[in-house]
Image (cartoon, rainbow, N blue to C red):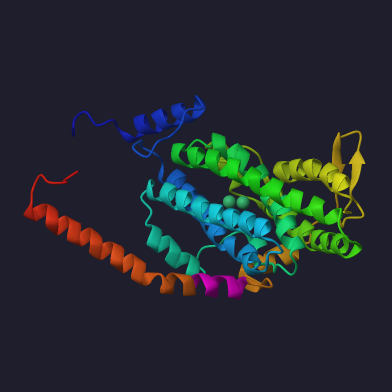
């Protein structure tokens, strides 16, 4: 083994080759430390966002206006828990420790998407989150199905299918409300006004202020820049807003025939920075709730560990029986 082990430059060449051929890097493959740590950071942040993202909408489960709406919302929030679990598993395939990552989330050392620090004030927010927030997530995540890291790319395929259900349920809810009373239409417009700009911020800082993008694109973790994805989202959403009959709260939004795309106004990056730094309307509440849930779940983790220990002891007493 010592004499046949390829040297580092050979390993690097193989890694670059695999990326160059658009093939996948798998957990057993050699990879540069920076590639591994970038992926762990990105996937962990993604997993945290799925789990924290359950909170704003879970706020409405007990008050959903019908059994049908409650069942849909429950299924959606449960999907987000599943997304978090696939993604934590993907980080474990890179050698990360899930409990450590949870520790970083609840101590504020690791971030999650800034969008989940805004409150859900009315039931129309459930629809607008599905339409805009899940819609933005789809724009971000569809290209990740082609990410160079195999386990992440494969997790994203299923996640994207479920996200498209989330987006449609949101849009269908809003369409129903827009065909309802004057008051319901007002609720939809008001929720759209509050969520539009934070949704555009979900794509991250402008390209000029996103120093890691170039390396992530070279490694084919990321396939498009933040600004490209944001533009794609705007172009996709404007006709949907028109069909719905709501106004997007941006006086500068207009079709640019020369570019063949929509122009839109300046994003308030000071708000984005404040929310990222922990000063959004719900940051403290979201993290406190996650910490409480983690503490309340400690008996489940202890019971599972005790059960595993018991099984191991049993296998030692009866070797061969039930041993994997
Ligand atoms: Fe999700
Ligand atoms: Fe979703």
Q: Nearer the viewer, residue 39 or 202?
A: 202
Q: Which residue lies furthest to the top in this view?
A: 21
- At horizontal 68% and vertical 71% (from top left) the residue drawn is 280
Q: Does the magenta stretch include residue 287?
A: yes
Q: In this view, does 10 lie to the left or right of 204?
A: left
Q: Tell me the chief SS of the magenta region.
A: helix
Q: Does the magenta stretch include residue 62?
A: no
Looking at the image, residue 268 lies above or below residue 7: below
- At horizontal 53% and vertical 75% (from top left) the residue drawn is 288
Q: Nearer the viewer, residue 128 or 257?
A: 128
Q: Which residue lies furthest to the front in this view?
A: 67
The x and y percentages for residue 129 are 70, 56
Quadrant of residue 262 within the rendered picture: top right
Write down the region rendered in magenta.
Answer: 283-291
The x and y percentages for residue 107 are 48, 71
The x and y percentages for residue 30 are 36, 37
Q: Could one spot residue 124 in this view of the protein?
A: yes
- At horizontal 55% and vertical 34% (from top left) the residue drawn is 146
Looking at the rendered structure, the number of numbered marks drawn on it comes to: 0
The x and y percentages for residue 141 are 61, 43
Q: Is residue 65 left or right of residue 73?
A: right
- Quadrant the N terminus occupies: top left
- Quadrant the C terminus occupies: top left
């Amino acid at each position: 083994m010592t004499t046949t082990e390829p040297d580092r430059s050979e390993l690097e060449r193989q890694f670059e080759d695999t990326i160059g051929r658009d093939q996948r890097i798998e957990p057993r493959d050699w990879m540069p430390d920076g590639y591994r740590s970038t992926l762990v950071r990105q996937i962990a942040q993604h997993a945290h966002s799925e789990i924290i993202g359950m909170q704003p909408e879970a706020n409405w489960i007990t008050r959903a206006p019908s059994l049908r709406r409650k069942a849909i919302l429950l299924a959606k929030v449960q999907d987000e828990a599943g997304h978090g679990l696939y993604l934590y598993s993907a980080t474990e395939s890179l050698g990360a420790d899930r409990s450590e990552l949870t520790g970083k989330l609840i101590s504020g050392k690791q971030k999650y998407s800034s969008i989940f620090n805004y409150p859900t004030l009315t039931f129309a927010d459930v629809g607008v989150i599905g339409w805009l927030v899940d819609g933005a997530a789809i724009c971000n995540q569809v290209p990740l199905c082609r990410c160079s890291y195999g386990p992440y790319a494969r997790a994203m395929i299923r996640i994207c299918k479920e996200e498209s259900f989330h987006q449609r349920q949101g849009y269908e809810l809003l369409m129903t409300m827009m065909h309802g009373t004057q008051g319901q239409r007002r609720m939809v417009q008001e929720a759209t006004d509050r969520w539009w700009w934070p949704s555009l911020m979900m794509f991250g800082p402008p390209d000029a202020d996103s120093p890691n993008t170039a390396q992530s694109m070279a490694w084919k973790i990321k396939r498009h820049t933040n600004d490209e994805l944001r533009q794609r989202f705007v172009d996709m959403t404007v006709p949907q807003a028109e069909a719905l009959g709501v106004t997007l709260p941006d006086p500068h939004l207009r079709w640019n025939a020369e570019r063949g795309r929509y122009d839109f106004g300046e994003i308030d990056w000071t708000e984005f920075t404040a929310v990222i730094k922990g000063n959004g309307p719900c940051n403290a509440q979201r993290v406190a709730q996650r910490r409480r849930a983690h503490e309340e779940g400690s008996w489940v983790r202890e019971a599972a560990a005790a059960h595993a220990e018991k099984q191991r002891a049993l296998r030692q007493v009866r070797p061969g029986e039930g041993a994997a």
